[in-house]
Amino acid sequence: MNLNRSFIRLSAAFLVLAAGLITLRFGRAAETGPAIRVDNTPINRDPQSGNSYSPIIKKVGPSVVNIYSSRIVKERYSDPIMSDPLFRHFFGGQGPGGQEISRRENWLGCGIVVAPDGYILTANHVVEGADEIKVTIQNDKTYSAKVIGLDPPTDVAILKIDAKNLPSVTLGDSDQLEVGDVVLAIGNPFGIGQTVTRGIISALGRSLSDPRDMDSSDQMEYQNFIQTDAAINEGNSGGALVDAEGRLIGINDAILSPSGASAGIGFAVPVNMARSVMGGFLNGGRVARGFLGIDPQDLDAGLAKRLGAPSSEGALVTEVTPDSPAGKAGLVTGDVIVAINGKGISGADNLRLTVSELAPGSVAKVKLYRKGVVKTIPVTLAERPGGEQAQAKPVGDAVQTAKADALDGVEVEDLTPRLRRHLGSDPSLAGALITSVNRASNSYDADLRPGDVILEIDSQAVINAEDAVRLCKASRNDTILVKIWRPDGDRGRIRFVDVDNTRLTN
């Protein structure tokens, strides 16, 4: 034991001596000073230097805005407990298809201001079907937006907000792009705030169509995507893809990923396509597209050889619509179209896109191979049926009655002495006991739960389940304020819950 103490003291003495030596050494070093070099000069941020893209982002970033859209959806929900006659529920009985509940779906995306007076380009899927669209610019000011035009075939939408002198982006020429060009993607991934990623153009003229599912209604009809490895994630849709000089060359639209997050394969709609759609809506109130009247199919080497075509580049005509421009001009099944007006055709999607970009009434010179013989046939194009019409109205005008019913998905029953004892509440507690809450409802999102007792609705007392039903039906507010008693310990606690049918989240 004494040996141990001595060792400890010795060790302590050694440490003190060592500390003194260390202090002495560092003290001398401080007097002479090390040769440290400091350079506070900012890096060369000339974009041509490749050191920084900060000047470009400062110029372009303010023109990229956040878009919040929401819509009411109705769903059928069946619950065995609904067959119990003791339970009363809001908004009528459960029919054969189950109880209908309504809930608000919320979407987050981006847009690009392309004109100082409030015109915005975005992706159609960000706003399609919405009954409310809000646009937030970088100074955090929020505007209600109206739809100028929706074009599902290209997934392009044009919005308008009531604002002046907004920072707007300069449009580039997407036809001049080449694989390997540097690009920057600007958006709001996962709602975390404006984010910039850098990459290159990985490919051009991409199509996402699945040849095994050509009848799928959710596929874009005209696809000519720019592919990039710049990171694009959920929330980036509708955001900007700009070149190394800050010019808009694409609208971020989709990713290919097994996990749902960026895997380095992102797609953007070329700005020239979006510009054409926008011009149609602004100048004529509609998008007029050329129509040939055929059903095309991609070629492979085997088909090309059998049909007498020189290569697999081109589109095979599988069907000709009677009395269509193609039918009238003499095109037949088995023709292989390789060019239109001198522009090469790479496949079926490229053929659809090329024809759509031509004006109705114009003459298209269709170069094709028929049983090994090359022909050029002039075809006077018609207008594609079902052209998309401009909306040019506030989104909510036609859907003001499509509100979610307050407390949809909630079932209640009267309080009884037995239930009060079970809850551990005061014997005099009055209200309506919540027996179930649909997990897909707004009420569940607002934190209403089974076992809660509704005491008030919009500051009006609830004595029983009938009161709850009556007050709920009478509510005309976008939100409903519910005062509840919740079991908690010996006494329970009072809470207020705001069931908000118009809140926008991501």
Image (spheres, rainbow, N blue to C red):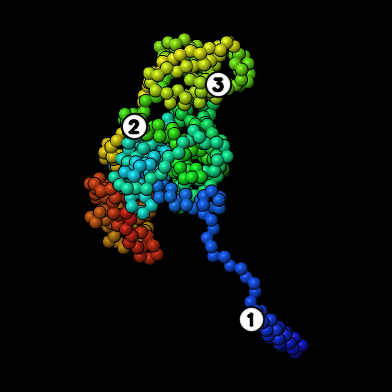
Q: Residues within 10 Å of mark 3 (few under 14, many from 20)?
A: many
Mark 2 and mark 3 in contact? Answer it, CB < 8 Å: no
**Secondary structure beneath label 2:** helix
Asked if 388 appears above or below 57 in the picture, the reply is: above
Q: Earlier in the sequence, mark 1 or mark 3?
A: 1
Q: Amino acid at mark 3?
A: Gly
- Mark 2 and mark 3: span between their CA atoms? 31 Å
Displayed quadrant of residue 21:
bottom right
Residue 223 visible within the image? yes
Q: Position of residue 307 (x, y in %)?
A: 59, 14
Residue 314's tag is: 3
Residue 418: % across, % down:
34, 56
Q: Is residue 506 above or below residue 12?
A: above
Tell me: 458 left or right of 225: left
Residue at 64% from the left image edge and 72% from the top image edge: 35
Q: Are marks 1 and 3 in contact (CB under 8 Å)?
A: no
Using the image as rendered, state which of residue 428 and residue 481 is in the foreground: 481
Q: Which residue is mark 1?
A: 31
Indicate the quadrant containing the N terminus: top left, top right, bottom left or bottom right: bottom right
Whichever of labels 2 and 3 marks the residue nearer the N terminus, that label is: 2
| Mark identifier at residue 323 | none
* Viewer-proximal residue among 158 and 10: 158
Distance between mark 1 and mark 2 Cα atoms: 75 Å
Q: Residue at x 57, y 65 (%)?
A: 39
Which disc, if any, is residue 281? 2
